[in-house]
Amino acid sequence: MIKKHKELKTPHGNSTIWRYMGLDKFLDLLTTNDLYFTNASKMTDRYEGVVPRKTLKSKRKRLEKLGKDPRDIDESISIFNVQYSSLKELTLINCWSINPSESYALWKIYLGGSKSGVAIKTNVSKLKKAIDLGNDAYDEDIYLGKVEYTDFIPDKELNRWKLVTTKNTFYEFESELRLFIFHYPRSEGGIKPPYEIAHGRRVKVDLETLIDKIYLSPFSGIWFEETFKNLIAKLSPSMQKKVVVSDVQDQ
């Protein structure tokens, strides 16, 4: 179930969002009705989910001005860093892009060199509703927040919510909307779910509600359109009417 939290910024329900993927991932979604949530520790950005370096430097300077012993400062910084960064392995993430139109850059990045792939177009309200209607067998809190792009978070403002919805300015072009699930250490009351957190998890969704349009890769060629539509006709006939060709004209 989607939950709200005061620390999270969420776009208007009518905001258009996209998810770009290779054909293999789309077919997995289509045949399982599952959205996959990746463990944050497996994200390619090594700064993902860790305390920004500028935040650590700022905290160090503040402690130095207070006249703290250097060894105590080192220990304090280390504890502070581990306290938040260690939670990365207990966080699961599913990513979307907020944009009124397609992104040429994201097509290139998410297809990873392949020419064949799709982009799902929907909006924030439909995403929320699709998850609720999915009625997943293992119901747990799922949060939704808009990512902010900065290389600094004041240490007094730092919390787990802020950390999971903050990325370096390098990635600002993604304009990301992030779904995420928090787990906690056993020592803090965390429980063992019916899946391996380290591997991520699948969440059931209602695809008819979720998918507004299925955009075909602009790099795939005319042959792919016919093949794809034939495949959709066999796997999910109701989705045929949602298939459209990309507006990007770049072969």
Image (tube, grey):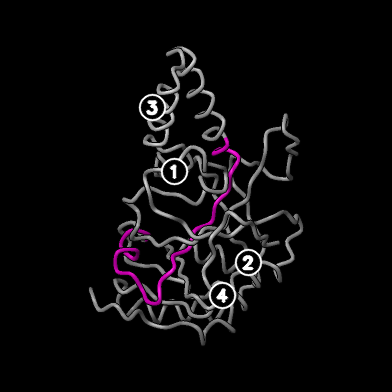
Front one among 239 and 49: 49
Front one among 47 and 198: 47
Instruction: Name the secondary structure under disc 2.
Output: loop
Q: Is residue 88 magenta?
A: yes
Q: How many marks?
A: 4
Give the CA separation, mark 4 to mark 1.
27 Å
Kind of residue at disc 3: Lys
Instruction: Name the secondary structure under disc 1.
Output: loop
Kind of residue at disc 2: Asn
Give the CA separation, mark 3 to mark 4.
42 Å
Classed neighbour count for the residue bearing mark 2: other residues with Cα under 10 Å, few (<14), some (14–19), many (≥20): some
Place of residue 190 in the rendered image (x, y in percent of width and height, measured from the top left): 73, 37
Place of residue 56 in the rendered image (x, y in percent of width and height, measured from the top left): 42, 31
Q: Which residue is mark 3?
A: 61
Classed neighbour count for the residue bearing mark 1: other residues with Cα under 10 Å, few (<14), some (14–19), many (≥20): some
Front one among 44 and 144: 144
Q: Which residue is mark 2?
A: 33
Sequence-first disc among 4 and 1: 4
Q: Residue at x 69, y 45 (%)?
A: 195
Magenta segment boundaries in residue numbering: 87-110
Place of residue 75 in the rendered image (x, y in percent of width and height, measured from the top left): 50, 17
Kind of residue at disc 1: Ile
Foreground mark, 3 or 4, reads 3
Foreground mark, 2 or 1, reads 1
